[in-house]
Amino acid sequence: MATETLTAERILAATEDVLRLYGPAKATVVDVARALGVSHGSVYRHFRTKAALREAVTKRWLDRTTRELSRIVADRSRSAEDRLASWNVALFTAKRKKAGADPQLFATYEVLLRENSGVVDEHITELVGQLVQIVQDGVAAGDFTPVEGNVEATARAVFDATIRFHDPVYAAEWSKPGIEAEMDALLALLVNGLKRRP
Amino acid sequence: MATETLTAERILAATEDVLRLYGPAKATVVDVARALGVSHGSVYRHFRTKAALREAVTKRWLDRTTRELSRIVADRSRSAEDRLASWNVALFTAKRKKAGADPQLFATYEVLLRENSGVVDEHITELVGQLVQIVQDGVAAGDFTPVEGNVEATARAVFDATIRFHDPVYAAEWSKPGIEAEMDALLALLVNGLKRRP
DNA sequence: CAGCTGACAGATGTTGAAATCTGTCAGCTG
DNA sequence: CAGCTGACAGATTTCAACATCTGTCAGCTG
């Protein structure tokens, strides 16, 4: 335990700790190095710049969510309609939990997301990809009709429509009473719009 | 012309000019007074504080949009489906035009909107109210079925769903090619969800 | 000799004194 | 005398000197 090898993962974990402690404005590479008991030069051996380090922390944080949601996508035993709603509720619940459990850290990640829009774009692409799979399954099962016959555009439309329930910009509204009813109404409207007409 | 009486409206117009010129951070009450050729004490006769002045400017700006849209709401000669799409397209087009025509001023208003969330909330309430009227008309005509039988909740859901196309937060995406197609897909999905099933 | 250290130059952030602004009001003016 | 002015106190912002941080690299160490 005295001198575990310095890995990227250990640095990332320490960086998250330091960010939680000092916030995004004051967390420095020197702080991270101190937390690990090494010199800051060693951190630069694993991450070319401070920006790259912060980007990696951001990606790590977003990937945890993507991984969780992928389980819902993969569960073919449930209907597409069911999974579509579950997926959206799970995404909302996960984000709201993060925002509520440690507002300090969540605010920090809001800053990181803004400065790493490339990582966010990739994350969104992955999420829309998951929705594509669910919609595709629904179409194959004869439950859904994609808008304009375009599954990609339809999945993207569903994602856009629920943006209020997953974009951290709106985090302040997530604790409002009645927010769940609002989401339910929106999901009902969307599912109704997707359903094949007899 | 030499000495027109100092009205609230003249002050508001001058304030907008000063904001356009200096930006939200540097525009001062003294600047506004100078633009009007009066002392800053006179401005304080009409607006209790600088914050109240900025709030009034913000409200004036938002009200211009509300007024334009009300013409679509009132036009009973068109179907609810038609007006719903028109209303959303008009809102999007108006905002996008403002953002594109004078990005400087639009950025300034983004700041004002953030510091006057109360005014924004009222504005949103008015807009949702307009949507309620359109949805109500559609239900009365037998074209729409409101989600959960609740017209208010349905109108709110439509508003939330299109947030990406009217919240200035996303202004950067409004000039992306293909954005109109994305809005069309979303509107088609929503209208489909609203339509009464035979 | 792979991996780490720490001194260093330039970039970025902090700090506090000086400058400007906000909001008030007694008195001036048309 | 209604409406405006401008001097003023306290609040806020600006600016420049100072402190800290980022990123590099020659050399140390296990």
Image (cartoon, coloured by chain):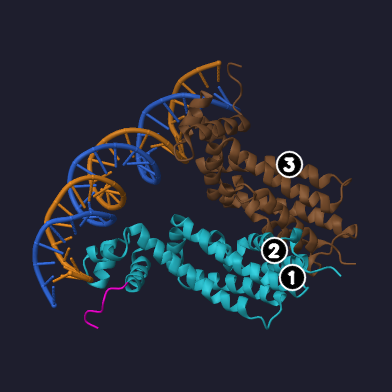
Chain colours: A brown, B cyan, C blue, D orange
Asked if one can make out residue B135 in the rendered structure from this viewpoint, the answer is yes
Q: Report whether A3 appears left or right of B60.
A: right
Whether the residues at callouts 3 and 1 have beta carbons within 8 Å, the answer is no
Q: Report whether D25 appears left or right of B1.
A: right
- Earlier in the chain: of badge 1 and badge 2, it is 1
Of discs 2 and 3, which sits in the foreground?
2
Q: Position of residue B70 (x, y in %)?
A: 57, 75
Front residue of this view, candidates A198 and B56 = B56
Whether the residues at callouts 1 and 2 have beta carbons within 8 Å, the answer is yes
The residue under label 1 is B139
B5 magenta-colored: yes
Cα distance between the residues tagged 1 and 2: 8 Å
User: Mark 1 and mark 2, same subunit?
Assistant: yes
Cα distance between the residues tagged 3 and 1: 42 Å
> Label 3 is found on which chain of the structure?
A
Asked if one can make out residue B171 in the rendered structure from this viewpoint, the answer is no
A114 magenta-colored: no
The residue under label 3 is A67
Examine the image and state in which quarter residue B10 appears: bottom left
Examine the image and state in which quarter residue B191 appears: bottom right
A72 lies above or below B96: above
* Secondary-structure class at tag 2: helix
Cα distance between the residues tagged 2 and 3: 37 Å
